[in-house]
Amino acid sequence: MIDLPECVFCRNIVTGKEAHIFYRDDHVIGFMDKYPVERGHSLIIPVKHFENIFTIDMEYYTRVHHTAKYVSMALMDVFHADGINVGQNNGSCARQIVMHYHLHVIPRHCGKEISWDRLLVTDAELEKEASLIRKKLSTFMDKL
Ligand SMILES: [Zn+2]
């Protein structure tokens, strides 16, 4: 059992202390990845700590993925994307780095090489992107 304060997502995201959050409800938080592989790279996590796909409660799992559908639609619009990668890693051998279940939602563009290298982005840029996604998501609010 992990000690919750040692989980960076529980400590910094769930508390709202240090994240560019664009969506939050009782079960799910959506926020900007601080180390994006593409502009608009978002993460969706359950509010409650679960380590991975094997342990996450089904209601939280379903809500995270439900949110991902609408976040994907918002990212297509806000970032003029041509496609979206949705994915997540389970276990250190699968390159899971933060041991709190999280789903990556990444806008992609035709003609641009798919890269997994991390970009350098400022907090101000992340906050601006979060506000654009928040605004677009608000048009789907009846579905979220
Ligand atoms: Zn956690």
Image: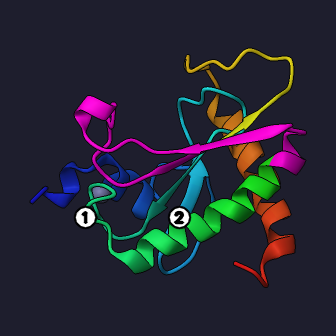
Magenta segment boundaries in residue numbering: 76-105
Secondary structure under badge 2?
strand
Percent x, y of residue 21:
60, 56
Q: What's the residue at 39%, 41% (across, down)? A: 89
Percent x, y of residue 44:
53, 56
To which quarter of the image does residue 114 belong?
A: top right
Residue type at the position of mark 1? Thr
Q: Which residue is mark 2?
A: 29
Q: What's the residue at 55%, 40% (across, down)? A: 33
Q: Which residue is mark 1?
A: 55
Question: Would you say 136 lies left or right of 36 here?
Answer: right
Percent x, y of residue 92:
24, 34
Residue 77 within the segment the image draws in magenta: yes
To which quarter of the image does residue 65 belong?
A: bottom right
Q: Nearer the viewer, residue 125 or 45?
A: 45
Q: Nearer the viewer, residue 70 or 19?
A: 70
**Image marks 1 and 2: residues in contact by CB distance under 8 Å:** no
Q: What's the residue at 34%, 70% (across, down)? A: 48
Residue 32 within the segment the image draws in magenta: no
Looking at the rendering, in which quadrant would you find the C terminus?
Answer: bottom right
Instruction: Tell me which label, 1 or 2, sits earlier in the chain.
Output: 2
Q: What's the residue at 61%, 70% (across, down)? A: 66
Is the CB of the residue bearing disc 1 within 8 angstroms of ligand 1? Answer: no
Residue type at the position of mark 2? Ile
Secondary structure under badge 1?
loop
Cα separation between marks 1 and 2:
18 Å
